[in-house]
Every structure is written in structure tokens, then in C-alpha cells.
Amino acid sequence: LESGALADLSTSIGYDPSRRPAESFWPEDWAQTQTAESAFRRSAAWYFQELALKIGAPTYRGYLAHFGYGNLQVAEGSDEFWLDRTLQVSVKEQASFLRRLLLGQLEISPR
């Protein structure tokens, strides 16, 4: 939302099986059009992979640096840096991020 890649939580992305073929481990409710809200609730990874491409690596790295989150490793054109362990985040960094998020200390919009 902060990057402008989504208008709001109801922004949908249509599921394209030719682009993202369903894997055997996918829950049934992944292989369908998702909104940001439904994708988050269902952990539908493909939706966030599409967003990663739309947002772009430089923007992601900028947010990660601003938040002090992880090793900033986001390869250009990558849509799975958080899935393939390229982006490494310590437990301490994760806890710090969540604390600052909940306290409103990240200088991002409350929405």
C-alpha cells in the first residue's frame, strides 16, 4: 500500500495458471483471483510474488533499509526473495520491526 502498487486491500489480481501453475502443496483457495486481504489471510504466495515484480527490487531494498530489516538482498527481477532465503532476517530484526510497526514508529501511513 505504501508503495502505491495497491490502491487498497480490495485490489485484486487475477490468477493466471499459465504464469503460476498450481503446485501440489497449494491449498485449493490459492488458485483463484485474490485481493490483498484474501491473499494475506490465505498466505497466497503467488499474489505477493506478483506484487514484488510490480514494486521492484530497488523500492523493496529502500523499504528494507529504512526499516532496518534483514540483509537487503533482493535481486533485480526476483519475485521470491523471501521464499528462497535470499532475504535473511534475524529474529531480533523481525521482533524490532513488529514492535515499531505496532507503535507507529515506521514513518508510514497508518492505513
Image (spheres, rainbow, N blue to C red):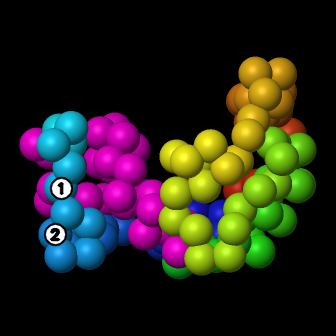
Give the numbered dot on residue 42.
Answer: none
Q: Quadrant of residue 78?
A: bottom right
Answer yes or no: is residue 99 visible. Answer: no
Q: Quadrant of residue 56?
A: bottom right
- Pointer 2 with pointer 1, Cβ within 8 A: yes
Whether the magenta-drawn stretch holds residue 59 is answered as: no
How would you rate the neighbour count of disc 2 (Cα within 10 Å): few for under 14, some for 14-19, many for 20 or more?
few
Q: Quadrant of residue 69?
A: top right
Q: Judging from the image, what secondary structure is the residue with disc 1 in?
A: loop
From the image, give the main secondary structure of the stretch colored magenta: helix
Residue at label 2? 17
**Residue 52 horizontal side relative to residue 32, left or right:** right
The image shows residue 6, relative to residue 110, as above or below, that is: below
Query: Residue 87: where, in percent of width, then height?
Result: 70, 48
Query: Residue 30: where, in percent of width, then height?
Result: 20, 49
**Residue 110 horizontal side relative to residue 104, left or right:** left
Answer yes or no: is residue 31 visible. Answer: yes
Query: Residue 27: where, in percent of width, then height?
Result: 17, 38
**Residue 105 horizontal side relative to residue 14, left or right:** right
Question: Could you tell me which residue is drawn at 29 percent across and 39 percent down?
Answer: 42
Residue stretch in magenta: 28-53
Residue at label 1? 22
Question: Could you tell me which residue is drawn at 83 percent across and 65 percent down?
Answer: 62
Question: Could you tell me which residue is drawn at 53 percent across and 78 percent down?
Answer: 54
Q: CA distance from mark 2 to mark 1?
A: 7 Å
Mark count: 2
* Lower sequence index among marks 2 and 1: 2
Q: Judging from the image, what secondary structure is the residue with disc 2 in?
A: loop
Q: Nearer the viewer, residue 85 or 46?
A: 85
Kindly identify the amino acid type of the residue bearing the numbered disc 1.
Answer: Ala
